Amino acid sequence: MNLTSPFFTATTRTVSTLGALVLLAALSGCATADSGAAASSSASAAATATAEADAAAGNCAGVTVVVDFGTLDADTVTECVDATEPIAASQTLATTGVTTEGSVEYGDQIVCRVNERPAADETVVVEGEESFTETCASMPPAYAYWALWVKAAPDADWDYAMEGLGTLEVEPGQSVGLVYTTGIETPTPGS
């Protein structure tokens, strides 16, 4: 797929945005003693809280994953995925438990659903636009889609991903994000 074709150039916002981004629940450095399920559960919860706090504070030595559901009314995911070398953005999402679905026509080069949202039977309403139900057959409308973002360094600005989720790789110290974007504004992850 040529992502520099006129079609994709004209729809850079949609493709890049839909290319999508993601999260983590990496529990690096968290060894739990085998002293029972309660101790393991407590250690896992503490490790997850630490990973989320590190990611939110920009202290992630691996890859920070941010998923913002926007108007889909779900909790934002911010996690730090343990990585010491380049890693597929899709793998960072999977590591955090975030699931994605592409489209029939474009496969995993775009993101149609994240954690099954918008659901196949969910009516998406955007003020001033025609309501619809996402079928994931092709490109979503330009006024309601998953945008894929990357951040080159903790102190850098977010940029649209220049390739789809299916091929995007990120490196330690970078961030990947998905934002469900509605209307004409394109908010960055965490904004």
Image (cartoon, rainbow, N blue to C red):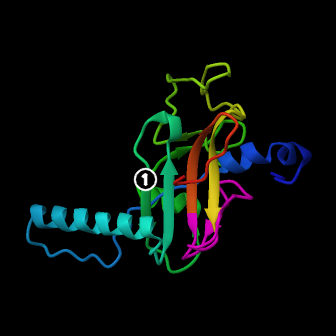
Spot occupied by residue 131 in the image (x, y as percentages of width and height): 62, 19
Q: For numbered disc 1, what is the local secondary structure?
A: strand
Question: Which residue, as the protein is rendered here, is positioned at the far right?
Answer: 6
The residue indicated by pointer 1 is 77
- Residue 109 shows in this picture: no
Q: Main secondary structure of the magenta part?
A: loop
Tell me where residue 125 appears, x and y as whole percent: 57, 23
> Which residue is at 44% across, 35% downward?
73
Magenta residue check for 161? yes
- How many marks do you count on the picture? 1
Q: Residues within 10 Å of mark 1 (few under 14, many from 20)?
A: many
* Residue 171 painted magenta: yes
Q: Is the residue 9 above or below the residue 78 in the image?
A: above
Q: Residue at x 66, y 33 (%)?
A: 183
- In which quadrant of the rendered view does residue 140 lie? top right
Q: Nearer the viewer, residue 171 or 52?
A: 52
Classify residue 99 as left or right of residue 37.
right
- Which residue is pictured at 13% across the width and 73% down the height? 34
Q: Does residue 24 appear in the picture of this structure?
A: yes
Q: Is residue 169 above or below residue 123?
A: below
Q: Which residues are magenta?
A: 152-175
Q: Position of residue 173 (x, y in %)?
A: 55, 76
Q: Tell whether 41 sits left or right of 54.
A: left
Q: Residue at x 45, y 51 (%)?
A: 98
The residue type indicated by label 1 comes to Val
Quarter of the image where one finds residue 95: bottom left
Relative to 26, is 22 above or below? above
Toward which corner of the image does residue 52 lie, by quadrant?
bottom left
At which x and y percent is residue 123? 53, 21
